[in-house]
Image (spheres, rainbow, N blue to C red):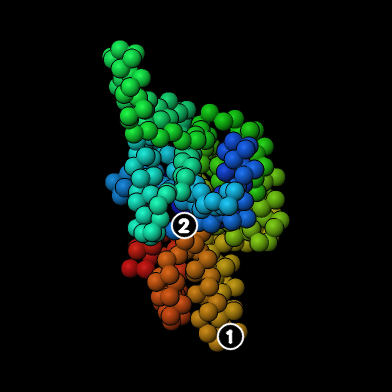
Amino acid sequence: MAHEHDSLFRSTFQDPVQAGALLRTLLPRDLVEAIDWSTLTLIPGSFVDESLRHKHTDLLFSAMAGGQKVLIYVVLEHKSFGDRFTALQVLHYVVRIHETFVREHPDATMLPPVIPIVVHHGKHGWKAPRSVLDLIDLGHFPAAVRRILAPLQANLSFVLDDLATTPEATIRARPMPPQGTLTLLLLQFVRESLASDPMVFAERWLPLWRALWADPACRFGLLSLFSYLAALLEAPPERFRAATARIDEGTEAMGKTIAQQWLEQGMAKGLAKGRAEGKAEGRAELLLRLIHHRFGVVPPDTERRIRAADIDMLDRWAERILTAASLDELLG
């Protein structure tokens, strides 16, 4: 289940436009005004331990603020109440970020500031400590000794976006593009509704769905949003067809689930382009877009492999895009 949460979060917020809108709702105003948001750039990779990826996914961005680089590190936390040691885990990830910076900039004499943010979704609100210092057991020492010990401890605090305690109306009122808002709403409110009809969610957020559909440049985002719904909801295909038709009549003829429908429509366009050009570029370009939305940033060697593949191989990969759990499984 965590994979679906991670894929949805990454597919939406790896886009600097979507991420910037989210971050501006979370950071203090002075910091928001200091950051040049036009410079916000995704840094590929993950700093989360392999053993903890069932609980966390992460995104790292760089931006300029007052002529200086800052790094903004966003972690998605799945566990209800929050893991008690999340602050310590985030500290570990931030140390890795700084170690990577030192390796890549051997002549550097200072480290860039890192702004850590935890986005939490779950059934219950966050109750875990929000700083490493709050995890250090200093309570049994005399006050004078605590004052000496406290500044000697490793410490880190993070900005918390606790979706579990944020009213739906507040999330909807955030000044964000429809795809970002829908992503947060789906993460928080679909998780505990595994038996729900997709029509419920189509009706519940109909203005947002229609606003997303109304922008042709953003329509492809529906693939990741409805792939998430299809993965979590126990509903027959006809209910997904009804839900998409409620958003717009133009979606009614698309496949068995909305995700499959978007794939089939996109593949038809890719095939047409491939036939018109007599080449595989159309299908390769489409597949790269699908991989980007499902698994995140496409590594350069993977992009080269896809662009070099023949039409038969591209078609086989396209057939797996909705069922593969990872990029390795897709291309294996």
How crowded pointer 2 is (Cα within 10 Å; few <14, some 14-19, many 20+) is rated as some
At a point 58% along the width and 52% down the height, the residue shown is 67
**SS at circle 2:** strand
Determine whether, in the image, residue 209 is placed left or right of residue 129: right
Name the one closer to the observer, 318 or 142: 142
78 vs 265: above or below: above
The amino acid marked with disc number 1 is Glu
- Report the residue marked by disc 1: 277
Task: Say which quadrant the N terminus sits in.
Answer: top left
Tell me, for residue 318, which label it has, or none: none
At a point 61% along the width and 33% down the height, the residue shown is 168
Q: Are discs 2 and 1 less than 8 Å apart at CB? A: no
Q: What is the distance, in whole Å, between disc 2 and disc 1 at their CAs?
A: 34 Å
- Report the residue marked by disc 2: 43
**Number of marks in the rendered image:** 2
Determine whether, in the image, residue 109 is placed left or right of residue 17: left
Rendering coords of residue 149 (x, y %): 31, 23
Rendering coords of residue 210 (x, y %): 69, 50
How crowded pointer 1 is (Cα within 10 Å; few <14, some 14-19, many 20+) is rated as few
Image-quadrant location for residue 274:
bottom right
